[in-house]
Image (cartoon, rainbow, N blue to C red):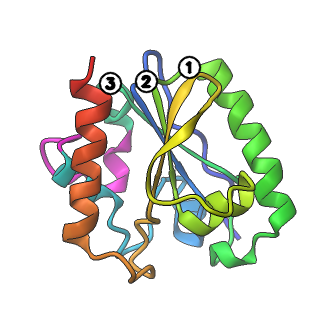
């Protein structure tokens, strides 16, 4: 199994995207959202965060745009379903500490079920959350994995556009 994937962060982050955990391709390559079919890179572009669809190998350019990437849990797995509820809850505690240190304006957790478990918010719904995470606005968006079929690309692109407007245009 691959290595943990290092956080992609920098100063003055406007948005810190937080995946559930690295999949096997990400662990093997040391890159976020590296699994073929993952829609994250298309959604960043469709939402207005990037001018073109980046490849995972181009992720290094994101901190210069005010965008970072981390994970709730660092352990590499073939599927997020391999994570225990305890791992997710421990990851939420670590994420909050990370957010206190990094001070992004907005934290976006990518995955409804994982968020509900990690933060013990069983009634959480997609979109901005009523609570803050260490003084950062908190958003919940669907997991961009191509394996997640509940939300289609067009619908998710609209969610990313709304997030972009909130995180970049509101200041």
Label 2 crowd bin: few (<14), some (14–19), many (20+), radius 10 Å:
many
The N terminus lies in quadrant: bottom right
Q: Where does the image place residue 34, in percent across and percent down from the top left? A: 44, 63
Q: The residue tagged with tag 1: helix, strand or loop? A: loop
Q: Nearer the viewer, mark 3 or mark 2?
A: 2
Which disc is residue 64 wearing? 3
Neighbours of disc 3 within 10 Å: few (<14), some (14-19), many (20+): few
Query: Any mark on residue 13, and which?
Result: 2
When the figure is inspected, residue 21 is found, relative to residue 163, above or below; the finding is: below
User: Taking the image as drawn, is residue 42 in sight?
Assistant: no
Quarter of the image with the C terminus is top left
**Which span is picked out in magenta?**
48-59
Quarter of the figure with residue 130? top right
What residue sits right under mark 1 in the picture?
Answer: 103
Q: Position of residue 127 (x, y in %)?
A: 41, 52
Contact? badges 1 and 2 (CB < 8 Å): yes
| Magenta residues, dominant SS class | loop
Q: How many marks?
A: 3
Q: Earlier in the sequence, mark 3 or mark 2?
A: 2
| Image-quadrant location for residue 27 | bottom right
Residue at image position (44%, 71%) is 35
Question: Looking at the picture, how far across and down is residue 113, in whole percent?
Answer: 61, 68
Q: Which mark is residue 162?
A: none
Q: Kindly state the secondary structure of the residue where label 2 is placed.
A: loop
Residue at (74, 77) in percent of width and height: 82
Q: Secondary structure at mark 3?
A: helix
User: Alpha carbon of mark 3 to alpha carbon of mark 2: how far?
Assistant: 9 Å
Residue 117 shown in magenta: no
Mark 1 vs mark 2, CA separation in Å: 7 Å
- Disc 1 to disc 3, how far (Cα)? 16 Å
């Amino acid at each position: 199994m691959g290595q943990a994937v290092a956080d992609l962060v920098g100063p003055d982050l406007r948005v810190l995207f937080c995946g559930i955990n690295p999949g096997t391709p990400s662990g093997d390559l040391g890159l976020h959202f590296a699994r073929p079919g993952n829609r994250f890179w298309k959604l960043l572009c469709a939402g207005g965060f990037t001018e073109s669809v980046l490849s995972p190998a181009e992720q290094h350019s994101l901190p210069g745009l005010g965008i970072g990437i981390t994970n709730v849990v660092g352990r590499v797995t073939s599927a997020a379903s391999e994570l225990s509820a305890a791992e997710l809850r421990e990851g939420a505690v670590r994420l909050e500490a990370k957010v206190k240190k990094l001070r992004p304006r907005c934290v976006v957790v990518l995955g409804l079920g994982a968020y509900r478990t990690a933060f013990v918010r069983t009634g959480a719904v997609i979109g901005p959350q009523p609570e803050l995470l260490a003084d950062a606005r908190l958003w919940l968006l669907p997991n961009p994995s191509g394996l997640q079929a509940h939300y289609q690309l067009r619908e998710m692109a609209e969610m990313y556009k709304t997030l972009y407007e909130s995180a970049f245009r509101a200041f």
